[in-house]
Amino acid sequence: MRVAIAALCALALTSCHRDHRRVIGVIPKATSHLFFVSVHAGVRAAERDFGVKVLWNGPEQETDYARQIEIADAMTAMHVDALAISATDRNALVAPVERAIAAGIPVTVFDSGIAADGFTSFVGTDNYDGGRTAARTLASLIHGAGSIAMIMQKPGGQSTVERERGFTDTLKSEFPRIHIVASQFGMGDPARSRAAAEDILTAHPRLDGMFTSAEASTIGAIQALTARQLAGKIKLVGFDFSDSHRDAIARGIMDATVVQDPFRIGYEAVRTLAMKLQGQTPPKQIDLKARVVDKSNLQDYLASLAALQRS
């Protein structure tokens, strides 16, 4: 596998150097999630705007940190001009990022952080604040009191851990009459997230609300609530956006979702590295604010997404 990845990178790099553009490797946490499809669109827009060449490669699932390490090391071995990475695990990706930096390759970390210093920029959502927003949204829906559950993403993913921490901290400090009675990890997989939600719904049939901290966990919870015909009976606040989120909001299965700006995350990740390669000093950190989408503003949000796709 390592040899195959290196060979692909070498082939791409040779082609890139023929057209004299600087080469930026971009490694998402996962290629199968809609969030990173939108990140990729932003990356491609920045590629055009700044005259660089992007190599896009990542694991299919965000639990596969070993594959992400292989890809990062292969791009470092090919000595790309710069590297952007969304870490599948904040600790496991420290070593390959430090190897890239030691090789003289500037690194921007996007979406999900790492437990290391020395990178050029961090670009991402203020996930702690996103969790606070989700907590306040769900609290409003259940009138500040009741029993709720959480379907979390996975251990070690900095972005979702911060969302979950912001959510629980805000409930504790602002809504003492709301109690988290159950929480489980869905491990970044809709099927496992659905199973976790089903287990919780069986154990707590009088649940008032549920918070899901990422795309996969939200899809799993939507499926569980749909199967049990609980639309409107249990308030659901999710995170991120997909066709499943859209349909669930329209049908009243999900009440709201906290959305990021993945297009801009991808765009800014490439922009910071293009600046660095041009001898400029990019911002050390770019925090993008999340927003709430519900039935009242769903059509406006969809229109904004369509406009981005046309641009």
Image (cartoon, helix red, strand yellow):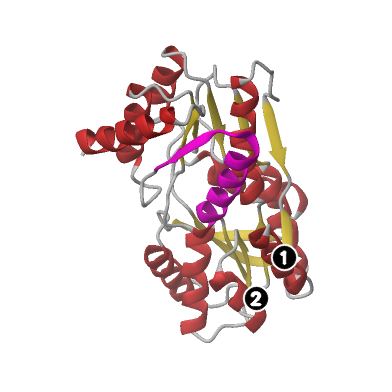
Q: Quadrant of residue 49?
A: top right
Identify the residue at image location x=68%, y=23%: 282
Q: Label 1 belongs to which residue?
A: 293
Q: As rendered, which of 168 and 60 lies closer to the eye?
A: 60
Task: Name the residue nearer the viewer: 64 or 220.
Answer: 64
Residue 50, magenta (yes or no) = yes
Residue 179: say if magenta: no
Q: Where is residue 140 in the image (x, y as percent from the top left)?
A: 77, 66
Which residue corresponds to the image point at 63% horizontal and 81% vertical from the top-left? 233
Image: 289 above or below 53: below
Dividing the picture into quadrants, the one containing residue 295 is: bottom right
Task: Pick the quarter of the image with the N terminus.
Answer: top left
Bounds of the magenta span?
Answer: 35-57
Location of residue 115 with respect to 252 vertically, above or below: above
Provide residue 110's location: percent of width, then percent of height.
56, 37
What separation in Å lies between label 2 and label 1 (alpha carbons)? 9 Å
Q: Are marks 2 and 1 in contact (CB under 8 Å)?
A: yes
